[in-house]
Amino acid sequence: MEPWQRLDETQAPDGSRIELLRRGPSYLIRADGYDLMSSDDSISASALGELGCAHISRQKPARVLVGGLGMGFTARAALSSVGQEACVEVVELVEAVAGWNEVTLAGLARHPLRDPRCELRIGDVFDSIRGARACYDAILLDVDNGPDALAHASNDRLYDRDGLRAALDGLAPGGALGIWSFDDDPGFTRRLQRAGFDVKRHRVTGSRKGRGRYHRGGIARQPTRSSRPGGQSGRGDFRSGRPKRR
C-alpha cells in the first residue's frame, strides 16, 4: 500500500504535533500520532451538521456555532441545512488547519469558508460557549474524538458538568447541542441528562468506502416547557470512545 505523505506539520497552542498527510486522493489530519479526521470518513462529520441543525427553519436567521473546523464537512453540512439569513460561526484552535482548509483541503467540502454566512475565528470554542447566553440555535462539537479529550487535554472542560451547563445556557430555547464521537460511553449520556438536556443518540456510517465502521452522534436538546425536568427523557446512550494510536 502506498505510504502516507506528510504535506505539512504544525504545533497546536498546547504543544500537540498536528500533521496533514495525503495518500492518493485521501487526506488525513493527525495529532500526536492519533488519527483525528480522514477525508474518507466524512459521512459522520457531515451527519453531525445535518442532525444538529435539523430542527432549524430555513426561514429563520439562525445562529450556529461549530467547534472544530477539521476538513470542513460539519461546517458545510450546517451551511446546507440553514437559510440564507443564517450565520455559522466556526471556531478552530489551530491556525494552520484553517490555512489548509483555504488551500489544500478547500474543495473537499465545497469551500465552506468562502460562504458569506460562515465566520471563522481562531481560538478555543470553550471561550465562545462560556460567553454565550441563549443565542445559538445549535452548538456542534467536532473536536478530538468526542468526550475523550484525545488531542488537547483542555477540551475536557467542554464535556464536564460545568462545560455542559455552559452549553445549555448558550442555546436558545429548544436549541441543540451536537457532539461527534468515535465510539461508546453510556456514562456521558447520564452526564448530559444531569446537566439538563434531553438526549438522543445516532449511529452513523463512519466511512464512505463501506468498511462497516460506525461513529456516534449525540444530539442533546435544550428541553422545551413540555419536557420533564432534569432532562430525564433521554432516549438511549450517547456513545464515545478512544481509538488506537496508528
Image: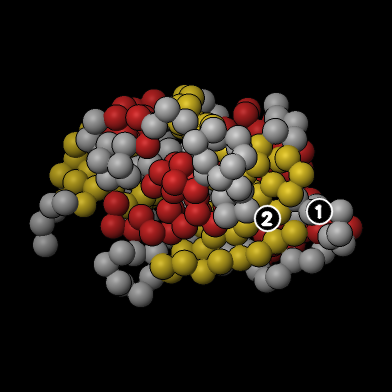
Q: Which mark is residue 235?
A: none
Observer able to see residue 241: no
Q: Report the coloring of the rendering.
A: secondary structure
Tag 1 secondary structure: loop
Few, some or many C-alpha atoms within 10 Å of disc 2 (few <14, some 14-19, many ≥20)?
many
Residue at figure coordinates x 73%, y 40% from the top left:
172
Residue displayed at 66% across by 33% down: 129
- Quick check: marks 2 and 1 in contact, CB under 8 Å? no
Q: Nearer the viewer, residue 84 or 117?
A: 84
Seen as rendered, the residue at the extreme front is 59
Checking the image for residue 224, the label placed there is 1
Q: Residues within 10 Å of mark 1 (few under 14, many from 20)?
A: some
In the figure, 24 relative to 241: above or below?
above
> Residue 220 bears which disc, if any?
2
Q: Is residue 126 above or below residue 145?
A: above
Q: Residue at x 52, y 63 (%)?
A: 216
Q: Secondary structure at mark 2?
A: strand
| Residue that extends furthest to the bottom in the rendered view of this protein | 212
Rendering coords of residue 93 (x, y %): 47, 30
Query: Which residue is at 30% across, 72% downward?
Result: 210
Disc 1 marks a residue whose amino acid type is Thr
Q: Nearer the viewer, residue 239 or 120?
A: 120
Q: Where is residue 3 drawn, in percent x and y? A: 13, 53
